[in-house]
């Protein structure tokens, strides 16, 4: 959806991951598009799949001056948005090197690779496995001896492959019974999440920010059983602390008579009905009135 650089009418910028982006629907069926139709207020959707709150801050910092706007909607998917890359996870990107930002202990932004063109999905590496191998070799050389031993065992052992397969099956079963709105977050991840929110607020320079929490289907089904959402309560308190607006869409989604009908079951994202319901929930917030 095209937008002009300037506008005499109010506009909003949407930040978030694939749920904000509308990964499984057409542009006109996204929640932001429904809000635009109903309010006549242009909604500029900058959602990008597989991004975290730190990514959203960096995206906004880079692109905010390209479009005049008056407010920001930040989508948060607790199922994975609080899981930023950390240096100790370097082994996990060995097979598919990705360029990811993270906060170091001093509060500075660092990256998982030295350059963005080293990532396996970059234009310079696309269809060039030889260059990807160069990046993987560079990452491997930077590992400690114990980490190298771990790589050798996990990459060349049939027994490990069997154990990993069984673990993945168990993880899928566990995930289906998990409510990420109720999860415990390690202190470093929580610190990084708060730091990203604070930096986003600074970049917004007084513009209102609405933090909107979005649920997966497993979040809904588990919440319907126990009605617990401790993480959502913590994030709401964090927003109050930093004068950010907040909306938790989980309780409203959980009231739907058939939550399965709101998701693409083989994928996990909202379908057209899910996007529209998200918009119906969000539009009730005073930001849109």
Image (tube, rainbow, N blue to C red):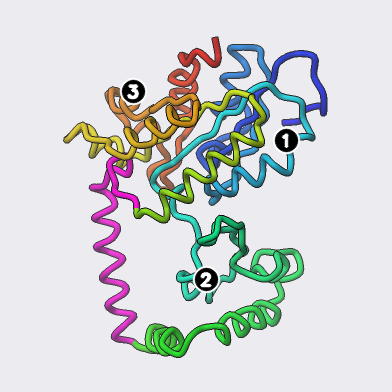
Circle number at residue 252: 3
Q: Position of residue 31 (x, y in %)?
A: 54, 27
At 54% from the left edge and 16% from the top edge, which residue is drawn? 287
Circle number at residue 8: none
On the rendered image, what quadrant is the N terminus found in? top right
Kind of element beneath mark 1: helix
Q: In terms of sequence position, does the residue under pointer 3 or pointer 1 come before the other?
A: 1
**Are the residues flagged by discs 1 and 2 in contact, CB closer than 8 Å?**
no
- Quick check: 191 left or right of 21? left
Kind of element beneath mark 3: helix
Per the image, the residue denoted by label 2 is 93
Q: Which residues are magenta?
A: 158-185
Is residue 116 shown above or below 260? Answer: below
Is residue 8 shown above or below 91? Answer: above
At 46% from the left edge and 71% from the top edge, which residue is drawn? 88
Q: Let me know if residue 44 is in the magenta part.
A: no
Mark-to-mark CA distance, 3 and 1: 31 Å
At 58% from the left edge and 80% from the top edge, which residue is drawn? 139
Per the image, the residue denoted by label 1 is 64
Is residue 97 shown above or below 262? Answer: below
Please tell me how many numbered marks the rendered image carries: 3
- Classify 10 Å Cα crowding around label 3: few (below 14), some (14-19), many (20 and above): few
Mark-to-mark CA distance, 1 and 2: 30 Å
Q: Position of residue 162 (x, y in %)?
A: 29, 79
Q: Let me know if residue 173 is in the magenta part.
A: yes
- Point out the frontmost of discs 1 and 2: 1
Q: Residue furthest front?
A: 106
Q: Residue furthest top?
A: 289
Is residue 73 shown above or below 192? Answer: above
Kind of element beneath mark 2: helix
Which quadrant of the view contains residue 33? Answer: top right
**Are the residues flagged by discs 3 and 1 in contact, CB closer than 8 Å?**
no
């Amino acid at each position: 959806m095209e937008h002009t650089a300037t506008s005499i009418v109010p506009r909003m910028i949407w930040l978030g991951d694939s749920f904000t982006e509308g990964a499984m629907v057409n542009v006109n069926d996204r929640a932001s598009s429904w809000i635009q139709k109903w309010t006549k207020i242009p909604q500029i959707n900058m959602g990008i799949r597989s991004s975290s709150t730190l990514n959203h801050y960096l995206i906004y910092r880079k692109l905010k001056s390209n479009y005049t706007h008056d407010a920001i909607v930040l989508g948060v998917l607790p199922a994975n948005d609080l899981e930023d890359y950390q240096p100790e996870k370097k082994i996990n990107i060995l097979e598919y090197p990705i360029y990811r930002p993270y906060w170091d202990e001093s509060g500075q932004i660092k990256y998982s690779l030295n350059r963005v063109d080293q990532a396996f999905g970059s234009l310079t590496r696309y269809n060039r496995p030889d260059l990807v191998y160069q990046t993987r070799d560079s990452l491997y050389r930077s590992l400690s001896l114990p980490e190298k031993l771990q790589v050798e065992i996990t990459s060349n052992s049939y027994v490990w492959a069997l154990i990993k397969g069984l673990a993945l099956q168990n993880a899928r079963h566990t995930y289906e019974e998990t409510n990420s709105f109720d999860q415990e977050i390690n202190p470093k991840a929580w610190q990084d999440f708060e730091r990203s929110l604070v930096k986003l607020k600074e970049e917004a320079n007084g513009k209102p920010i609405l933090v909107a929490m979005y649920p997966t289907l497993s979040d809904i089904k588990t919440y319907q059983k126990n009605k617990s959402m401790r993480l959502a309560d913590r994030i709401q308190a964090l927003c109050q602390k930093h004068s950010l607006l907040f909306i938790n869409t989980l309780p409203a989604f959980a009231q739907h008579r058939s939550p399965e009908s709101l998701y693409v079951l083989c994928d996990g994202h909202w379908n057209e009905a899910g996007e529209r319901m998200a918009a119906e929930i969000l539009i009730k917030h005073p930001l849109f009135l």
